[in-house]
Structure formats: structure tokens, C-alpha cells
Image (cartoon, coloured by chain):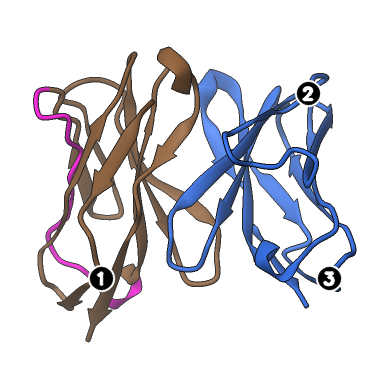
Amino acid sequence: GAVVSQHPSRVICKSGTSVKIECRSLDFQATTMFWYRQFPKQSLMLMATSNEGSKATYEQGVEKDKFLINHASLTLSTLTVTSAHPEDSSFYICSAQGGGNTIYFGEGSWLTVV
Amino acid sequence: GNSVTQMEGPVTLSEEAFLTINCTYTATGYPSPFWYVQYPGEGLQLLLKATKADDKGSNKGFEATYRKETTSFHLEKGSVQVSDSAVYFCALRSFGGTSYGKLTFGQGTILTVHP
């Protein structure tokens, strides 16, 4: 079946630095990818919708200058958390839309800001 | 926009017990409901889905029927196993209105099954 890969699966960074998370569709092209954030023991919150070759559409309350999303190709979208702070520590998960509008999720990335 | 409400947990059962996790929703457009499962430390996996009214999705012994008249998609399993311990998310996707194409998730229900 279709596979979506996220990298890194776990990352620890220092406060004030930036960290990039990659989301790749391995065996299909995805014109649309979605980025979610999940706090411990809570549901997934959609952060933004990423469309290949255009600017991402951010959900209300999500800082677009802090969470930079780039969808430069049909198989890769990246989320960069800029000037990270401890409150940005979370589980970030992407999904990619494949053929027939089917959604496939990545494995998720644990970010810890110290 | 769309909203999904699912039964609050946590739910604790003994092995071989019957499981029901309720899920109801409000949506615009033409919604499709899903159940996702998240095992400890892992990402989301699609458990089952339905595409039209009265469809029954099933997988790994789990079932859910899309009831348009009650806007519900309750998850059931006749005999749970310890390996079913996970967080279960009800989700909705519609292709109309302001939530076009997006997945909206319920709050998740933690299931723990004891031997």
C-alpha cells in the first residue's frame, strides 16, 4: 500500500534554534499534504494544508511565520519550526492525499525543545 | 465547520469483553467517516472507513456502520484482546463547505484491555 515517511522520528533541539521535519510520499505523488500537531493525550489539531507549488493554507491560530511549510515537489513537504521554544514540544504528524482522495499518514515526529 | 464527538475515555475492559465506542458528528457537504487507531508511541493507522450511508466498515474484528439519520459511526468489537489497547480516533472528511477535504478528528478514546 501507499507509504508516507516522516523524518526524523524523534528530534531534540535547543530553545531558539530551528528544526525541520520532512514528510515524503514514497510510492505516489501527493499534490496535497496536511500537517497536524498532537499534544499528549489529546486529539490531532490540523495546522495547515500544503499544496505543491503554492503557499500553505494555515488554520486559525497557527503562526505561519513560526511554522514554515514548504511543498516543493509532489513527494515532499517540510515543516520548519523556527525559533523553537519548549511549548513547541509536541508530536507532529503529516498526511498525504493520494489517488481517489485517500489519506495516508506518516509515522509522526516527536519534537522536544530543551 | 465539521465537528466530531466521541465517547470519552479511558475505557478499561477485560479480554474477550464487548467494546463500543460512540461517535457522532456534524458536517456540511458529503461526509465520510473513519476510525483511526494509534498504538503507543506510533503514528495513526486507518482502522476502517465508510463512504456512503448504511455502509459497514470492518477490519481486525472491528465494525462500524455509517448511520446518516443519526449522524453516527459507532465502533464495535465483539471480543477485545490485550493487543487492542490503543487510542481510537473517530474522524470525518467532507468535500463541501469550509472544511473541504480536511480530516476532522474526535478527541480520542483510550482503550486498555487487561488479560
- Quarter of the figure with residue B57: top left
- The magenta-colored residue range is B69-83
Q: Position of residue A103 (x, y in %)?
A: 53, 34
What residue is pinned by disc 2?
A55
Q: Position of residue B91 (x, y in %)?
A: 36, 40
The chain carrying label 1 is: B
Q: Which mark is residue A15?
A: 3
Measuring 73% from the left and 26% from the top, which residue is drawn there?
Answer: A29
As for residue B77 lying within the magenta part, the answer is yes
Indicate which disc, 2 or 3, sits on the residue closer to the N terminus. 3
Q: Secondary structure at mark 2?
A: loop
Q: Residues within 10 Å of mark 3 (few under 14, many from 20)?
A: some
The quadrant the C terminus of chain B occupies is: bottom left
As for residue B79 lying within the magenta part, the answer is yes
Q: CA distance from mark 2 to mark 1?
A: 39 Å
Q: Amino acid at mark 2?
A: Lys
Measuring 35% from the left and 29% from the top, which residue is drawn there?
Answer: B2
Q: CA distance from mark 2 to mark 3?
A: 27 Å
Q: Colour of chain B?
A: brown
Magenta segment main secondary structure: loop
